[in-house]
Image (tube, rainbow, N blue to C red):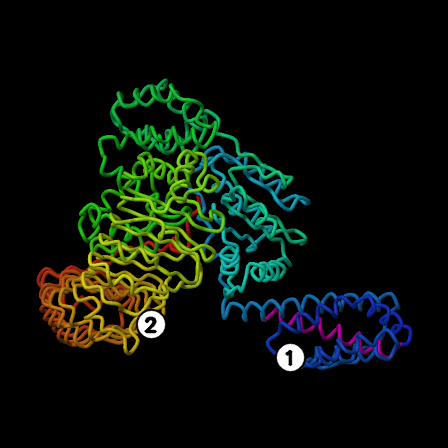
């Protein structure tokens, strides 16, 4: 309010000077000259006026009269009269006071210029407030996704950061290319730059961070920019439309210094980078890439670590100071670190793989490293070094197989742990609840081959086998290592096949340009295979990446033995190939859309012929109407549009999925309720409806599901109640109603759930407990402190009752995609 009062007083003074000028002939001549020079300002006012929710008629008059100001002095006075009128109406109906005297002509001229500057500032403030409110539909959220976390432990980057910061903060060059070998720390250094205090002081919230990867989609990148800026993401008609709207966005936020980081830009994407070059003052673009682009003048080369920093990094990840036995001597450590040639990725992976290993194992690694070439000569030789690291899996062939499965997923994308659980269950016979899969993942994580990321850690942890918030992060080079290992066998005997069909790889599989040096040796053979009429492929797992420009080439491939199909989309429409009906052994289908808007599956009904299909996972898909899949055991819908699934006239879900065991629906914003026919699926054991804020009711006959063991309803904020029939779920052992904050009470019959062992109630302090809960023996309640108070009266009554209030780890990891 203090700032508003000061601004009001300032405007009152401005308006008084304008009125005085109207009565003074000498000053009018000066004002006329000043007004002619303010033509650009009036144009700005016109642009701002167009952006306001309710443009002012007074501004329109100002613009009209400014056009006539060239002919006479009178319009000049009228113009300022209209401007005064507009200020009077817009800003608190400011009263006009008489000014007692006018100073010199020079002071009047300066006052007029000062007035014009204030007009510009005020209009800029109004425009920004109204435009941001209109585009975002409410409050502004900065950096909601895409912006990496601040790096933790780093070595050898202080000096590169200082020198890079000088280039970014200095005037001049607009595009800076940060280049170095894969795994050298380019993304880490770029992220450190974004968190540097001097950089933040200059660019404030105008620091944007997007990842390109090998096959960038312009529209997707621009969508991320709008999202990071807190604006509503538009639906672009074309790439040109995306570029035009991106220019408008950058110019809008570019009134202040702006830093745009384009991470992981691959060869061939230079032209795309140039589309982000806009003539604006104090606008910097930082590009990170494995290659130096000649067309951009400024290059910053990230050099390998020196021996001292390399040893520090190695000791940190090898945990040498904490090992209690078999600590190698300094000479052995020096040789191992020297073999890594300063590559941070190789050092970290090697250190973790050697941690707590016997002395003889260290000697074996040193001997093999001494026989190879420099690890930094090329990416291919880095892969050769990483291959030696996989020797830690030499006696673990099954875990190595699981590691190679990770290469089936796209680069620079998080891998959902739930998808791996589905795949490994059907391929290798692991358990349904994911415990065995998590054991394998933890082993790979301990070897630094993957990084396990848990987004939105909730109180309903792993003890209820809920892994929807668990993801794997895979470095680019480690992913390529997994691919390389998978493709050592001839294609006829290969267990995995990856097909990349997009506008950069038309009519080719794993083209040389897309898959790097290590894939060149198999590219020519695959290209010849495509030219044949058909290829007899015996792979168990098939992964297809495709976009809107090029449909899948599965029609040219026989896949009689395929058991798992992974489809990665960047398109609004997708149709399964005709040959999918012949995949008689297909057990798992995973379809993921990596675009911003949901994709539609046009011929989902073709899956009805797949008698062995057991698991389907759809992500960011406009879920299709139900089709009959008699042997389907699990369906997972993540961030899907649910409008068409349960429409009237569709096949009842009990007829479509008569043998369904598990139903998982997560982050589906238009999910409102489940059909009552669901209660006729007698094999159903697990229902999970989570983070569906519009979901408001369970089926009334849910008590008919006599085999139901787990019921998760967390974060369904509109849930109004639980049906009384829930008391008939005699073997229900877990109920999760965490953060169902509008749930008024628990039904009286809940006391009949004699098998209930875990009840999650965080955020349910307003939920009333019936006295029948006294019958729930051996119950563990996990909740917050407020909800725990409701259970205090039952502690003396219920045998073996445990009320736990865990410490919740609040973080925003769920907002961040992968950064390599």
Above-or-below relation of 29 to 214: below
Q: Nearer the viewer, mark 2 or mark 1?
A: 2
Query: Which label was assigned to residue 679?
Result: none
Q: Nearer the viewer, residue 596 or 721?
A: 596
Residue 295 place in picture, x, y as percent: 63, 41
Quarter of the rendering containing residue 670: bottom left
The structure residue drawn at horizontal position 55% and vertical position 39%, both measured from the top left corner, is 178
Question: What residue sits right under mark 2 in the picture?
Answer: 644
Farthest right residue in view:
26
Name the side, left or right, on which 724 lies relative to 122: left
Q: Secondary structure at mark 2?
A: loop
Is 131 in the magenta? Answer: no
Horizontal and vertical percent position of residue 87: 70, 77
Give the labeled residue for mark 1.
92
Report the span colored magenta.
1-24
> Residue 796: x, y in percent?
11, 65
SS class of the residue under badge 1? loop
Dividing the image into 4 quarters, which one contains the N terminus? bottom right
Tell whether position 13 is magenta: yes
Which residue is more in the foreground, 107 or 743? 743
């Amino acid at each position: 309010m203090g700032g508003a009062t000061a601004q009001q007083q300032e405007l009152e003074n401005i308006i008084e000077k304008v009125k005085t000028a109207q009565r003074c002939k000498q000053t009018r001549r000066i004002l006329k000259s000043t007004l002619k020079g303010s033509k650009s300002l009036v144009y700005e006012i016109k642009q701002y006026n167009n952006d306001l929710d309710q443009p002012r008629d007074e501004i329109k008059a100002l613009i009209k009269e400014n056009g006539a100001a060239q002919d006479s002095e009178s319009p000049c006075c009228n113009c300022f009269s209209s401007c005064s009128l507009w200020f009077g109406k817009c800003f608190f109906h400011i009263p006009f006071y008489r000014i007692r005297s006018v100073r010199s002509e020079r002071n009047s001229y300066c006052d007029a210029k000062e007035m014009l500057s204030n007009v510009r500032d005020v209009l800029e403030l109004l425009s920004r407030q109204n435009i941001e409110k209109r585009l975002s539909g409410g409050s502004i959220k900065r950096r909601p996704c895409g912006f990496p976390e601040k790096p933790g432990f780093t070595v050898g980057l202080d000096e590169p950061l200082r020198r890079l910061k000088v280039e970014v903060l200095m005037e001049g060059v607009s595009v800076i290319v940060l280049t170095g070998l894969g795994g050298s720390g380019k993304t880490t250094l770029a992220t450190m730059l974004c968190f540097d205090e001097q950089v933040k002081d200059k660019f404030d919230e105008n620091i944007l961070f997007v990842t390109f990867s090998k096959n960038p989609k312009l529209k997707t990148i621009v969508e991320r920019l709008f999202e990071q800026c807190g604006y509503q993401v538009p639906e672009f008609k074309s790439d040109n439309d995306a570029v035009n709207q991106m220019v408008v966005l950058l110019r809008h936020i570019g009134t202040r210094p702006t830093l745009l980081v384009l991470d992981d830009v691959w060869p061939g994407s230079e032209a795309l980078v140039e589309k982000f070059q806009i003539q604006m003052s104090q606008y910097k673009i930082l590009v990170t890439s494995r290659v130096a682009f000649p067309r951009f003048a400024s290059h910053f080369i990230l050099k390998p670590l020196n021996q001292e920093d390399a040893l520090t990094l190695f000791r940190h990840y090898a945990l040498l100071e904490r090992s209690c036995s078999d600590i190698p001597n300094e000479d052995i450590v020096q040789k191992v670190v020297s073999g890594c040639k300063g590559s941070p990725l190789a050092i970290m992976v090697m250190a973790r793989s050697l941690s707590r290993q016997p002395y003889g194992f260290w000697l074996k690694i040193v001997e093999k490293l001494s026989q190879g070439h420099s690890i930094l000569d090329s990416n291919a030789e880095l892969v050769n070094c990483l291959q030696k690291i996989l020797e830690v899996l030499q006696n673990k062939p099954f875990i190595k197989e699981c590691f190679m499965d990770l290469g089936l997923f796209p680069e620079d994308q998080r891998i959902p742990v739930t998808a791996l659980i589905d795949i490994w269950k059907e391929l290798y016979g692991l358990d349904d609840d994911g415990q065995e899969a998590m054991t394998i993942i933890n082993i790979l994580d301990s070897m630094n081959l993957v990084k396990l990321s848990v987004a939105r850690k909730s109180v309903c942890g792993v003890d209820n086998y809920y892994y929807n918030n668990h993801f794997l992060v895979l470095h680019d080079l480690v992913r390529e290592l997994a691919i390389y290992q998978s493709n050592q066998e001839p294609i006829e005997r290969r267990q995995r096949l990856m097909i990349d069909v997009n506008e950069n790889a038309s009519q080719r599989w794993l083209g040389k340009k897309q898959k790097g040096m290590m894939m060149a040796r198999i590219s020519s053979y695959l290209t010849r295979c495509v030219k044949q009429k058909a290829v007899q492929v015996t792979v168990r797992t098939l992964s297809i990446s495709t976009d809107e420009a090029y449909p899948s080439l599965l029609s040219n491939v026989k896949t009689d033995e395929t058991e798992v199909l992974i489809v990665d989309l960047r398109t609004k429409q997708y149709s399964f190939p005709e040959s999918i009906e012949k995949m008689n052994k297909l057990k798992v289908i995973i379809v993921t859309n990596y675009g911003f808007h949901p994709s539609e599956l046009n011929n989902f009904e073709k899956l009805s012929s797949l008698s062995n299909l057991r698991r389907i996972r759809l992500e960011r898909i406009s879920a299709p109407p139900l089709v009959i899949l008699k042997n389907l055991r699990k369906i997972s819908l993540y961030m899907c549009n649910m409008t068409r699934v349960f429409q009237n006239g569709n096949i009842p879900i009990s007829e479509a999925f008569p043998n369904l065991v598990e139903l998982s629906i997560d982050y589906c914003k238009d999910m409102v309720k489940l059909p009552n026919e669901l209660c006729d699926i007698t094999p159903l054991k697990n229902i999970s409806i989570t983070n569906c804020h519009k979901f408001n009711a369970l089926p009334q006959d849910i008590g008919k599901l006599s085999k139901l063991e787990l019921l998760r309803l967390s974060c369904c904020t509109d849930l109004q109640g639980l049906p009384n029939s829930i008391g008939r779920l005699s073997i229900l052992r877990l109920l999760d109603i965490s953060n169902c904050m509008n749930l008024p009470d628990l039904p009286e019959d809940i006391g009949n759930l004699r098998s209930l062992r875990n009840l999650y109630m965080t955020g349910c302090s307003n939920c009333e407990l019936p006295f029948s809960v006294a019958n729930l023996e051996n119950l563990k309640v996990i909740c917050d402190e407020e909800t725990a108070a409701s259970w205090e009266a039952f502690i003396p009554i219920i045998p073996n009752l445990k009320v736990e209030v865990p410490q919740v780890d609040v973080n925003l990891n769920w907002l961040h995609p992968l950064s390599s």
